[in-house]
Image (tube, grey):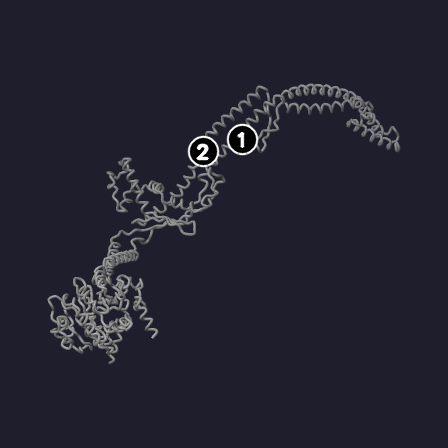
Amino acid sequence: MNSMTEKNEQLAVGYDPYDDMAHETPILIQYWQAVLRHKIAIAAILAVCVALGIIITLLTTPYFTSTSRIEISREQDKVTNVEGVTGSDGAGQNLEFYQTQYSLLESRSLAERVVRAKNLASRDVFFETFGVDPNDSGILSDAPKAQSAAQRNLRLKLAVDLLQEQVSVSPIRGSSLVDVNFESPSSNLSAEIANAWIEEFIASNLDRRFNSTADARKFLEEQLAELKQRLEDSERNLSSYADNKEIITLSSEQTPEGKTVSQRTLASANLEALNAELAQATADRILAESEAKQRSGNKIALANIPLNSLREERAKAQAEYAKLLVQFEPEYPAAKAIESQISALNKSIAAEETRSRTGTSARFSEALEREQKLRAQVNRLKRQFSGERRDSIQYNIFQREVDTNRQLYDGLLQRYKEIGVAGVGTNNISIVDRAQPAERPSSPNLILNVALALLGGLGLAATYVFTMEQIDQTVKDPSDLKSKLGIAPLGSIPDFEKTDILQSLTDKKSVAWEAYLSIRTSLSFLTDHGVPRSFLLTSTRPNEGKSTSALALAAVLASTGKRILLIDGDMRNPSLHQMLGKENTAGLSNNLSGADDLSQLIQEKTDYGFDAMTAGPIPPNAAELLSSSRMRDLINRLGEIYDTVIVDAPPVLGLADIPLLSESVEGVIYTIEAGGVKMRGIQSAIQRVRSSRAHIFGGIVTKVQSQDSGYGYGYAYQYTYGNKASAED
């Protein structure tokens, strides 16, 4: 009782019981249904695209790709121990360094270097390899000597364009390695160009480094010329001053800083030598004077070596003579001989003593004279040296100027030499792998081209399906009723021929029966008393399955044991009598014209278990008959006899029957053919029904293809199950 009260309250506020069962078809299922609807067109598009891909692949000239690999290091290899003008400490420390190198590898200037290095502009074989006729660019002669400058430039431009189109740079991620790829119809040409490309890139890199110091070298050359002139002038001034002042430098030393120090002139050298001789003369004079003063023989003997020798011999002779006298007489011959020897020695000693005293006086006189002369010369040189020292002040000034200019000149000259080799002294690019001629072509790739063609075909197919779906504004799925038309979907019916559906209704395990049985279930939720006591079925136009659905619903409802009456309300184009195989001699038109005997108008217990009222004879104006109150009275009268009265009404568009009929029943069930009427026509028809204040219970989608319905699986399952059961029976 409480549930019934709650249900009545929900209906009173406009609650639609089917809202709890309605659902939106998932987007992926919608896409899949769209694909199935256009599967033939999709297959055709894919087949054409794949065929084109295969044909193009077979007709395309094969190309060979050769790859050379280089390493671009951040740190540069030091070949010379000198630095250039620009610093290299921060080179390549960020992404900009490598991006710059990649751009340089693809630059036009590098392509021009390769063309010139390999003389490609004058090689007709090069152009023929790519199938290019250089004469198409306005070149009249192929002979290099006969070509004008303009013609050579045109060939050069064409060759450069070909290289840039075929070369590609592929950095290896996470490393400093870079692959340079070149593609051409000749494997040998590809390897040749790929190797030439990296060689010219290395050469251009060195050229850029060398050229970057050109301005510095020019500036240094100017400075060196100026400093050289200044150095020559200062040296000339120094030499002239030294000549004028007679300053003769014998030796000089330079400090590590380049300053000239400890100079030795001729005057200082002479003074030093004479001073040494004077010291020696003074010493000799003192010695001679000392000897002269010593008159004592003993003292003289001490210093006279010959005299000492004579005296020593005399002493020996005297000792021997004394020894002989002990044994012999003085007259002994041997004694007499020794005595004569002693006498001779005495005379020699006396003569030597006399000579020694005379020589000492002479030596003293000579030593004194020599000392005096040397002292006079030393004094003269001292005066000369003192004047030279005064002149050396200005001399040192000139010398410092010479030293300064020489240091500046030597420093700039060294820097000039360093800069001259700095450009070629550093190289941060090395060749890792040289390109080799490819053994097989890299393009065209049949598998890749077929895959791309297939991918392109899928894109075209998707575009086609999207376009057709946008153009085809029809109902395709029961969920469209709720989202696009604002009515509840009561169910969907698969696409059957009318005769097939009528035959299927005799089998309660058939797909058609199961479909209408689910609609009957939906009808039981429409009102508080279950299935509506009276309702009509209409459609936008004829042949949308409206009459067949009315008969099927009547049969399904009758199978539950309820009394059901089906009325053919389409008096302009009746069809119920044909489906039942009955005569249409009396029916609805007779009642609306005044006949009240229902027993003569109703055909009881048809083959489907329900009673039927055909349309009757076709009246001249059906709208006039429906505009009277007899239709409402008839429905009320039949409602007392039957549990449910179903009216098979005519279509909406172009007729005035539906607004008149809808006033007599509880509500309207709208029948829509899947893929039939455009959405705009259906919306207009539904709006017309609503304008008559009729209540639309919901809609039934008929003639649904299995690929268009989300319920196809259930139908297929029921269909298989039913056939299996029949086979078992």
Is 541 rendered above or below residue 203?
A: below
Is 418 rendered above or below residue 625?
A: above
Question: Is the residue under label 1 in contact with that under label 2 (CB below 8 Å)?
Answer: no
Q: Under tag 2, what secondary structure?
A: helix
Name the disc covering residue 480, or none. Answer: none
Q: Residue furthest bottom?
A: 729
- Does any portion of residue 504 appear in the rendered image? no
- Could you tell whether 244 is left or right of 195 in the image? right
Q: Which residue is located at x 30 percent, y 45 percent?
A: 162
Residue in front for this viewpoint, 299 or 670: 670
Q: Say which quadrant the N terminus sits in.
A: bottom left
- Quadrant in the rendering for residue 343: top right
Residue in front for this viewpoint, 709 or 626: 626
Q: Name the residue under label 2.
A: 217
Q: Label 1 is placed on what type of residue? A: Gln
- Does any portion of residue 599 appear in the rendered image? yes
Q: Label 2 is placed on what type of residue? A: Arg
Q: Position of residue 337 (x, y in %)?
A: 83, 28
- Quadrant in the rendering for residue 48: bottom left
Q: Name the residue under label 1.
A: 407
Q: Under tag 1, what secondary structure?
A: helix
Q: Where is residue 283 in the image (x, y as percent from the top left)?
A: 74, 25
Task: Using a 10 Å C-alpha cutoff, classify the residue at mark 2 as few (fewer than 14 neighbours), some (14 to 19) or many (20 or more).
Answer: some
- Could you tell whether 286 is left or right of 692 in the image? right
Q: Where is residue 277 in the image (x, y as percent from the top left)?
A: 69, 24
Q: Where is residue 92 in the image (x, y as percent from the top left)?
A: 45, 45
What separation in Å lies between label 2 and label 1 (alpha carbons)? 19 Å
Q: Say which quadrant the C terminus sits in.
A: bottom left
Task: Using a 10 Å C-alpha cutoff, classify the residue at mark 1 as few (fewer than 14 neighbours), some (14 to 19) or many (20 or more).
Answer: some
Tag 1 or tag 2, which sits nearer the N-term? 2
